[in-house]
Amino acid sequence: MGIFSSKKSSEPIIDNLPQHLGIIMDGNGRWAKKRGLPRTAGHKAGVETFRRISRYCSDIGIKYLTVYAFSTENWSRPEDEVAALMKYFKSYLEEALRDFADDTISIRFLGDMSRFSPELQELMRKNEAMSASHEGMVLNMAMNYGGRAELVHAFKEISKKISAGELSADDIDERLISDYLYTKGQPDPDLIIRPSGEYRTSNFLLWQSAYTEYYIDDVLWPDYTSEHLNKALLEYSKRNRRFGGV
Ligand code: IPE
Ligand code: IPE
Ligand code: MG
C-alpha cells in the first residue's frame, strides 16, 4: 500500500506533501538507446509515463504539478526528433481535451506558445479553456519553456508598463517580478524531481526554485513509477527547509 492510505485517497499518510511538485521528464533518449530503439520510441514511452504519473499526482492530492516537456533549447535537436515530439504533443492534447472534460485537472501551459504550429496552439487554448474552471490539480506543462526566456519576457512586459507610465522603477520588487512570470499566482515549487541522474536545472523554473528542494533519481523517465515518486515524496517530507533562517 506504500505511504498513502490508498492510491485513490486524497489524504496521504505523510502530512507533508509538496504543494507544488516539478518534474524534469528526462532520459527518454537513453532509455530508447539502451533498447536499440530510435530516440523517438523513448519519447513515445515517456508520454505514457507522463499520463500515469500525472494521474497519480492528482489522485494523491498534489495541488500543482509542473512538468518540463520541451525546453527553449530542445529546438536544436534533429528535425525528425522535434517533429516526432510535436506529433506526440498533438495526440496527447487531443486526448486530454476528451479525457479531462469530466475531470478535475486544470491544464495550463508555461512558455512562449507562439513558436508552435497554429494547430498545436489551438489545442493548447482549447485545453486551457475546457479545464479553466476545474478545481483539482493544476497541471502546468512547460513547453518551449526556459527560465531565462521567461525572465526576459517578464522584464520586457515590465519595461513596457514603465514606458507607458503605468509602473515606476520603484515598484519593481520580487513580488512584482513573480507576477510577470508564467506561474503568476501559483506557489513556488517545493520539490523538483529529475530522473535520469543529471544534476542540473537545464533552465527549469530558475526564479521560482530559489528555495526548492531537489531530488535526483537515476531511473530513466519511461521507467519511472509511482514507487519512485513515493520514495522522493517520503524523503522530501523529512527534509528540513530553512529558507535562510535557523
Ligand atoms: C527528455 O528526454 C525529453 C525531452 C527533452 C523532450 P531526452 O530526450 O532529453 O532523453 P536523454 O536525456 O537524451 O536520454
Ligand atoms: C531538460 O532536459 C528538458 C526537458 C526534460 C524537457 P534536456 O535533456 O533538454 O537537458 P540537458 O540537455 O541534459 O541539460
Ligand atoms: Mg535529456
Image (tube, rainbow, N blue to C red):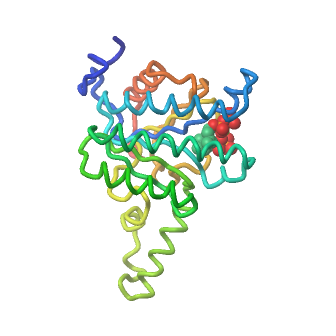
Q: Residue at x 27, y 20 (%)?
A: 13
Rendered view: 139 above or below 181? above
The number of callouts visible is 0
Residue ID at (50%, 49%) = 142
Can residue 240 be seen at all in this image of the molecule? Answer: yes
Taking depth in this image into account, of 203 and 28 the one nearest to the observer is: 28
Residue 54 picture location, percent across and down: 41, 33
Counting from the top left corner in percent of width and height, residue 206 is at 53, 53
Q: Using the image, determine if residue 53 lies above or below residue 81.
A: above
Left or right, 164 with reference to 218: left
As drawn, is 54 to the left or to the right of 114? left
Quadrant of the rendered image containing residue 59 = top left
Q: Quadrant of the C terminus?
A: top left
Q: Of 51 and 215, which appears nearest the observer?
A: 51
Q: Is residue 213 above or below residue 184?
A: above
Q: Position of residue 216 (x, y in %)?
A: 56, 31
Residue positioned most to the top: 1
User: Which of the two residues, 27 or 133, is positioned nearer the viewer here?
Assistant: 133
- Name the spot of residue 239 as percent of width and height, x first: 41, 30
- The image shows residue 180, relative to residue 67, as above or below, that is below
Residue at figure coordinates x 55%, y 34% from the top left? 194
Quadrant, the N terminus:
top left
**From this viewpoint, is residue 190 visible?**
no
Which residue lies at the image location 73% right of the left edge and 22% below the top edge? 34
Occupied quadrant, residue 80: top right
Front in this rendered view, residue 171 or 141: 141
Left or right of 6? Residue 144 is right
Question: For ligand 2, which image quadrant applies?
Answer: top right
